[in-house]
Image: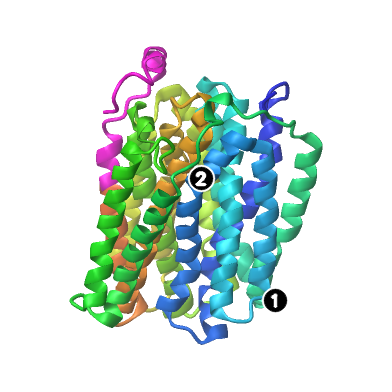
């Protein structure tokens, strides 16, 4: 019996919602805590950026093996174990005495999320029929998006009242409640026989970590070391070499870290590329915006969080609505205008941001960005998963999340490099907005070739595993 079988699919959605809220808020409160963490440990932006990047790189390393674990050993078991491990990591973060220990605790958190995430998505997708998946993933992404952007709002209030450590501690009761409800209401599931044999390519996972970590190191440290320094050059040579070896091993290994056969499914590759360009850029954009608010504009964490509240107010509800619209009208009519809104919002902000608060500039630019997030963020994932079925749901979802995390690592690394290389945070933020605009233009180009209109869907689904992607 599958986890979702025999139960209302929306009841299953409600059961995994606690994990979505906990994981998303855990991720986003780190941004509003960034400056406070620097102050607590007397660390610079480059060192503190590893609080973000160590988390993302660990996810990159573990998501595919954990997706395989979910498919092989059961999604319910993986989901509940991951939620529990995330709670343990949150406790370690909240009590960390030094920056290295804090970074190590973030690795533990990422391990929990790596177990939880693919299993949660697979549980959800298994509960809904294929023709309603965009609605489900849109709602799932919308809830995650609301939690993601509520993190700085709630986190700012908590920091001002209690300190940054408590922003991580609130994950613990949410996780405990989720585990209790999961044990009570999620039916045990049997792993598919199609995924019982073999183990994931751990060597490929290690190469993926090396490649991503070297890319982040080369970009972040180039400002301090210099672009021609041999350490920078070595890091930036090792990065593409390692990633190329990952692709080569994946083409030959029976349990590859990247299942290249998934890319034969129509639009799976495009959805993953959109996840890299659009969803992955969220981290760098948020870091730059919070740096302007708390640095150049000298706002308190709570005021900065409240100033960002427009993103959940617009982006959250729009994510729910856009999933239904994607089911009805196809993805292109949402992804293209969504990416365009992000481009216009970024350029608007870049053209007028100054050293002092200017809310007449801020709110229109952020409103456009939030609208773009609501239209494009969740739908990049639902596009990738549109035609995926069978026992590979966990691994397919994990691969999609990996592309988002690689985008996150790259955007944080570039953002830190641009901020460090600028005379003041405003100049650095302008450069980051230009990066976001280019990513959005790339997203428009990718999404323009997508056609998932329902009139053509039945034919496509019947050929999904036989046709190459376009």
Q: For this rendering, which residue is in front, 193 or 369?
A: 193
| Residue at 69%, 59% in the rendered image | 87
Q: Which residue is mark 1?
A: 161
Horizontal and vertical percent for residue 288?
40, 68
Across the whole image, how many numbered discs are drawn on residues? 2
Say few, some or many: other residues with alpha carbon within 10 Å of mark 2 (under 14 / 14 to 19 / 20 or more).
Answer: many
Residue 458 in magenta? Answer: yes
Horizontal and vertical percent for residue 129?
57, 21
The answer to whether 157 is drawn above or below residue 466 in the figure is below
The answer to whether 151 is drawn above or below residue 270 in the figure is below
Q: Which residue is mark 2?
A: 65
Which region shows up in magenta? 442-470
| Residue at 41%, 33% in the rendered image | 383
The answer to whether 411 is drawn above or below residue 95 in the figure is above
Helix, strand or loop at mark 1: helix
Q: Is residue 250 visible?
A: yes
Q: CA distance from mark 1 to mark 2?
A: 40 Å
Classify the position of the N terminus by image quarter: top right
The quarter of the displayed image where residue 17 is located? top right
| Residue at 28%, 41% in the rendered image | 444
| Residue at 63%, 70% in the rendered image | 93
Classify the position of the C terminus by image quarter: top left
Q: Are marks 1 and 2 in contact (CB under 8 Å)?
A: no
Helix, strand or loop at mark 2: helix
Pick whichever of labels 1 and 2 is earlier in the sequence.
Answer: 2
Q: Is residue 333 visible?
A: no
Horizontal and vertical percent for residue 283?
44, 59
Residue 247 in magenta? Answer: no
User: Please, which residue is most extreme toward the front here?
Assistant: 198
């Amino acid at each position: 019996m599958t986890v979702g079988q025999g139960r209302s699919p929306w009841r299953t959605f409600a059961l995994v919602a606690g994990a979505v809220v906990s994981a998303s808020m855990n991720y986003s409160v780190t941004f509003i805590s960034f400056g406070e963490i620097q102050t607590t440990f007397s660390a610079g932006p480059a060192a503190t950026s590893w609080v973000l990047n160590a988390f993302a790189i660990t996810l990159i390393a573990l998501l595919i093996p954990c997706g395989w674990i979910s498919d092989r050993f059961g999604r319910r078991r993986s989901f509940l174990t991951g939620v529990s491990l995330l709670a343990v990591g949150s406790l370690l973060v909240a009590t960390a005495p030094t920056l290295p220990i804090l970074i190590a605790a973030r690795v533990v958190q990422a391990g929990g999320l790596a177990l939880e995430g693919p299993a949660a998505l697979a549980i959800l997708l298994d509960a809904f029929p294929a023709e309603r998946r965009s609605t489900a993933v849109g709602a799932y992404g919308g809830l995650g998006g609301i939690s993601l952007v509520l993190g700085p709002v709630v986190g700012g209030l908590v920091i001002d009242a209690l300190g940054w450590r408590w922003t991580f501690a609130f994950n613990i009761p949410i996780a405990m409640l989720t585990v209790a409800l999961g044990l009570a209401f999620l039916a045990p599931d049997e792993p598919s026989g199609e995924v019982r044999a073999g183990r994931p390519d751990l060597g490929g996972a290690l190469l993926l970590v090396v490649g991503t970590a070297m890319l982040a190191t080369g970009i972040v440290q180039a400002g301090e070391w210099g672009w021609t320094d041999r350490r920078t050059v070595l890091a930036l040579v090792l990065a593409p070499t390692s990633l190329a070896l990952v692709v080569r091993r994946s083409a030959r290994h029976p349990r590859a870290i990247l299942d290249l056969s998934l890319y034969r499914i129509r639009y799976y590759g495009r959805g993953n590329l959109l996840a890299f360009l659009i969803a992955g850029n969220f981290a760098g954009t948020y870091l730059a915006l919070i740096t302007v608010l708390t640095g150049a504009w000298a706002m308190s964490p709570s005021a900065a969080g409240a100033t960002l509240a427009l993103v959940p107010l617009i982006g959250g509800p729009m994510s729910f609505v856009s999933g239904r619209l994607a089911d009805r009208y196809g993805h292109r009519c949402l992804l293209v205008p969504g990416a365009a809104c992000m481009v216009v919002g970024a350029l608007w902000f870049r053209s007028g941001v100054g050293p002092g608060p200017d809310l007449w500039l801020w709110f229109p630019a952020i409103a456009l960005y939030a609208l773009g997030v609501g239209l494009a963020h969740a739908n990049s994932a639902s596009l990738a998963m549109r035609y995926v079925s069978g026992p590979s749901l966990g691994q397919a979802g994990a691969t999609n999340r990996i592309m988002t995390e690689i985008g996150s690592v790259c955007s944080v690394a570039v953002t830190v490099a641009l901020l460090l290389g600028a005379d003041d945070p405003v100049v650095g933020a302008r450069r980051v907005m230009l990066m976001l605009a280019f990513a959005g233009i790339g997203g428009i180009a990718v999404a323009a070739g997508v056609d998932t209109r329902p009139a053509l869907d039945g034919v496509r689904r019947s050929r999904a595993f036989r046709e190459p992607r376009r």
